[in-house]
Image: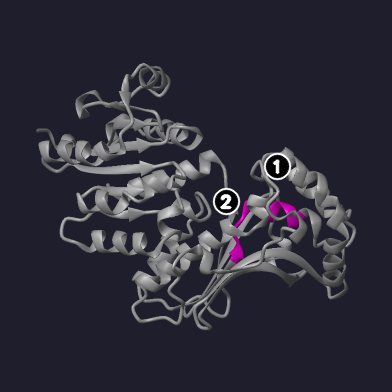
Amino acid sequence: MSPSQNKDILVGIVGVGLVGGELVKQILSINKAKNPFKIVLLSSSRKALYTSPENAITDSEGWKAKFDASAEKAELSKFGGYLAGLVAQGKGRKAVIVDNTSSEDVARLYPEWIAQGLSVATPNKKAFSGEKKTWDAILAASDSEGGGRWLNESTVGAGLPVINTLKEMLGSGDKVKKIEGVFSGTMSYIFNNFSAASSDAPKPVFSEVVKVAREKGYTEPHPADDLNGFDVARKLTILARTVSALSHSQTKLPELESFLDVQTQSLIPAPLEGLASGDEFVGKLPGFDEEFNKLREEAAKEGQVLRFVGVVDVEAGVVKAGLEKYPVTHPFATSLGGSDNIIMFHTERYSPRPLIVQGAGAGAAVTAMGVLGDLLKLV
């Protein structure tokens, strides 16, 4: 076996939509002479394509046709065994499963896959922010002899270096005091436009900003799925659990049974809770513009803006998400544009000035880049 074969990293990709397709493209764009990755498994929710390392996917244009022609049904229970078997057949091989879905069913399999010696790389937040027993099982499997790694950079901030930065801080013994930020691209866009730092900026009504955000594709089809704050709560859960798991000493942070334990402020007006139709929700939202206008006016009188912010306060033992006021000179007021994310790390080493990470926090290209960055950690 040649030296290059000894370095093979076999890749199984579950979810071949926007992010999955972009990831395939990015993997295959690596110089062939230096590319250690061999895509040997592709799967959607309905079908799968299995290949050998010798016949791995190499055609960035033709793989879709090959995948579409496959008659194999997608059976999640087979993926781990298939990849583990290929690893056993080649000395020095590693394997990783990339989960590009948002599926709970896929997420629940991470502990099993990791225990088989496979690594998992994913933008799927479910396993790391859902039931604590799944999170605990992932940690246990990874710590076991021969266990694979869990790589989840893209679960918070897409391609932004948030998770890896946090892991390196904690691994090197830095003490995190507080993490705060605008973690939702949707909420970022809405409040950058609704509550701008410039006093000369036009003052649109809240419902119109939400409507435009929806038309631009910044919100979910049903905007309530963003305005409930759950996406931010999931990201905070991931950060809080990472801090608790990797800190060199015990923290005051609560043991979150799931993201539902995060203190989360919903921006859905009470009378609109439970509306099944996104169109109906947007149609009725103007009836509550005055309430949001008052909040903006109160902030403006104090020289402040409104931002939907998530906070992991390690020293106070608090994890919360909600609408907060910030001075017009604060980075949350001055540095954000469009749907950018911005995250501040307040630590013993980064004090009194925090480390700030900001940039595009959503999109297929940057999300896939974050996943590929995780894969490169396996090389």
Q: Which mark is residue 277?
A: 1
Image quadrant occupied by the N terminus:
top left
Image: magenta residue range: 181-192
For this view, does 364 lie left or right of residue 80?
right
Place of residue 332 in the rendered image (x, y in percent of width and height, measured from the top left): 68, 64
Q: Residue at x 44, y 53 (%)?
A: 126
Place of residue 34 in the rendered image (x, y in percent of width and height, measured from the top left): 29, 36
Place of residue 358 in the rendered image (x, y in percent of width and height, measured from the top left): 59, 57
Q: Is 8 located above or below residue 129 in the figure?
A: above
For this view, does 338 lie left or right of residue 260?
right
Mark 1 or 2: in front is 1
Q: Amino acid at mark 1?
A: Ser
Q: Amino acid at mark 2?
A: Gly
Dividing the picture into quadrants, the one containing residue 150 is bottom left
Place of residue 153 in the rendered image (x, y in percent of width and height, measured from the top left): 43, 54
Q: Is 231 located above or below residue 208 in the figure?
A: below
Mark closer to the chain start, 1 or 2: 1
Q: Which mark is residue 361?
A: 2
Q: Residue at x 17, y 35 (%)?
A: 5
Q: Secondary structure at mark 2?
A: loop
Magenta segment, prevailing SS (helix, strand or loop): helix
Residue 185 part of the magenta segment: yes
Q: Which mark is residue 16?
A: none
Dividing the picture into quadrants, the one containing residue 111 is bottom left
- Tell me if mark 1 has few (under 14), some (14-19) or many (20+) residues whose alpha carbon lies within 10 angstroms of its own: few
